[in-house]
Amino acid sequence: FVTKRPPRPGDWLADGGPGEGDRGGQDFDAFATSVGLHARTSRMARAYMPSSARKTIYLTAVPPFSEHSGAPALATVASFVKAWFGLPCQVYHGTSSPPKHGARRRGGREQLLTTQINSWLGDVKAALPDAFALLALTGADLYPEPRFNF
């Protein structure tokens, strides 16, 4: 993957293109308080932004992908994420794995309880001092609460 190039003829932001007027963008205060970061001020929103200390995006698979699952290799996804976001991206190979309680089978497919995964991701991210984000990829079906039946 290559990093984003400057606009070229025919691109949205190119000279004379329909998005040429959008090139100036918006300042950080306007962005941070308008994109749903649940922050009323730009100072609060900065906690949701990468910093020099917290800039690495980590990826993991839940449950781990096998070579024959048909899923892309996490290293391939990491190279895309790095190019897209312009931040370092690594595959997380930690020793802990997400809890299996809350997992169930419906319609012949494994379903994973999202609250369990989110809790585990939060604990792992807290132990990674340079982590801006820890993202889990899955081929399993997800459900938000035990009362949901789908």
Image (tube, rainbow, N blue to C red):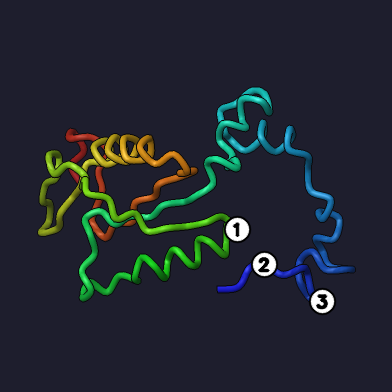
Closer to the N terminus: mark 1 or mark 2?
2
Determine which residue is flagged by label 1.
86
| SS of the residue under disc 2 | loop
Q: Residues within 10 Å of mark 2 (few under 14, many from 20)?
A: few
Of marks 3 and 2, the one in the foreground: 2
Question: Badge 1: how crowded within 10 Å, few (<14), some, or many (20+)?
Answer: few
Number of the label disc, if any, that sits on residue 9 = 3
Place residue 137 in its image quadrant: bottom left
Q: Kindly give the residue lying farthest to the top in the view shown.
A: 40
Position of residue 4 measured from the top left corner of the image (x, y, whole percent) = 67, 67
Q: Position of residue 15 (x, y in %)?
A: 88, 68
Distance in Å between CA atoms under marks 3 and 2: 15 Å
Foreground: disc 1 or disc 2? 1
Q: Circle 2 sits on which residue?
A: 4
Q: Mark 3: few, some, or many residues within 10 Å (few <14, many ≥20)?
A: few
Query: Contact, CB < 8 Å: mark 1 with mark 2?
Result: yes
Image point (78%, 43%), residue name: 26
**Left or right of residue 14: residue 60:** left
Q: Secondary structure at mark 3?
A: loop
Mark number, residue 29:
none
Q: Which residue does the image show at 58% across and 34% down from the upper left?
A: 36
Image spot of residue 56 (x, y percent): 49, 50
Task: Say what amino acid the circle numbered 1 marks.
Answer: Gly
Does residue 90 sit above or below 115 in this rendering? below
Look at the numbered disc 1 and give the secondary structure of its residue.
Answer: loop
- Looking at the rendered image, the quarter that the N terminus falls into is bottom right
Q: Position of residue 38 (x, y in %)?
A: 56, 28
Q: CA distance from mark 1 to mark 3?
A: 23 Å
